[in-house]
Image (spheres, helix red, strand yellow):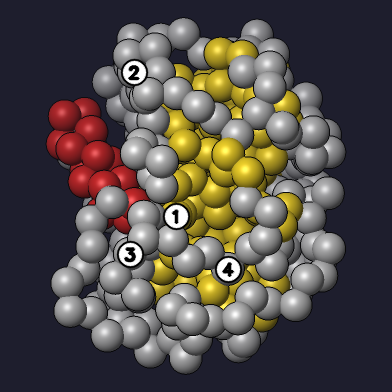
Amino acid sequence: MDAAKRHRHLRTALLSLLISAIAGATALITTSCIGAPRPTPTGEGRIAFVSDRDGNWEIYVMNADGSGVTRLTTNPANDFFPSWSPDGTRIAFWSDRDGNPEIYVMNADGSGVTRLTNNLTQDLDPSWSPDGTRIAFASVRGGHWRMYVMNADGSGLASLTDAEIDGMEPAWSPDGTRIAFRSHRDGNWELYVMNADGTGVTRLTNSPRDDWSASWSPDGTRLLFISYRGSNGEVYVMNADGSGVTRLTNIETDESAPSWSPDGSRIAFASISDGNWEIYVMNADGSGVTCVTNDPADDGQPSWSAR
C-alpha cells in the first residue's frame, strides 16, 4: 500500500471511529447512556477524552465516574489522542492547530501548551515511556508510516522502524522494555511488539481482519486491542505474547480506544451503541458495562490516568 492510500486509510478510520453515526444500529450492551445512573465513584485517577460537544474536537478530563467534566483545550482547530504522562502531571496529544497534525504537550490542567514536533507531514499517536523521559509517536515523514521516539521536550529524535515498513499507534510497556504497535506490513493491520530500540519485532495477532489500538495492562502481562475479526470492531484482550485471545464486548456497533484503569480492574472504551460516540467503563472480564458520558455530541479516545 503506497503512502497516499495509507493516508486515506488513516483519515477514513479516524472519521469512522470518531465522527460518523451508524444509523439504526442495535447494541447488545445492557446499559444505555440514556437515563443511566453514573457508576459509583472509586477515586481511580482521571479519564482524559476528546469531544466535539463545543463545536470542534477538543480535549476534556473527567473523574472515573464521569463527574467533573472539564475542558482542557480551547482552539478552533482539532485536538486528539490525549496520552497521560506516568506521573499524571502532563498530557501529550496531537493537534492540527498549526496547519497539519503535530505532537504537543500540556499540563494536566490545560496550561502550558508546547509544540514538540515541527514537520510538514503528519505526526500522531504519542505514547510516554514509563519513566516520563521520552515519547514515541507515528509519522508519515519519508512517505511511509514509521515510528519515532524523542525526548519529552521534543529533542533527540530517532527512528524506530524501517523506512519501507509502516507502523502506527505505539504503546510503551509498563517496564519500558517493549513497544506494541500496529502495522500493515503483512497485508492488513495486525499487532506487533518490538524492543524499545526498534529491534526484535514480533507479530502478536494473525487475523484476516484488522487489529489495532493496543493498550498494556498495568502489570504488563496483557494487551487490550480492537479487532474487526467479527462483523464490527470489538474490544479483545490477549496475553503479552499474543496467546489467549478473548473477546470482551459483544456489541453490534463499533468500539474504539480501550484503556486500562490504574489497578487493571476496569477498562474504559468508546462505543457508538446509542447512536453517537460515548465513553463506557466495564470490568476487566467484560462484565458490568456502564456509560460514563451522556452528551448529544461525540465523546471518544478515553485515556485513564494512573494518578
Residue highlighted by disc 3: 276
Distance of label 2 from label 3 (alpha carbons): 27 Å
Q: Secondary structure at mark 3?
A: loop
Residue highlighted by disc 1: 299
Quadrant housing residue 139: top left
Residue highlighted by disc 4: 292
Distance of label 3 from label 4 (alpha carbons): 13 Å
Q: Across the whole image, how many numbered discs are drawn on residues?
A: 4
Judge the density around disc 3: few (<14), some (14-19), many (≥20) Cα neighbours within 10 Å.
many
Position of residue 18 relative to residue 125, above or below, is: below
Residue highlighted by disc 2: 100
Amino acid type at circle 2 is Asn
Q: Secondary structure at mark 2?
A: loop
Distance of label 2 from label 4 (alpha carbons): 31 Å
**Mark 2 or mark 3: which comes first in sequence?**
2
**Mark 2 or mark 4: which comes first in sequence?**
2
Could one spot residue 128 in this view of the protein?
A: no
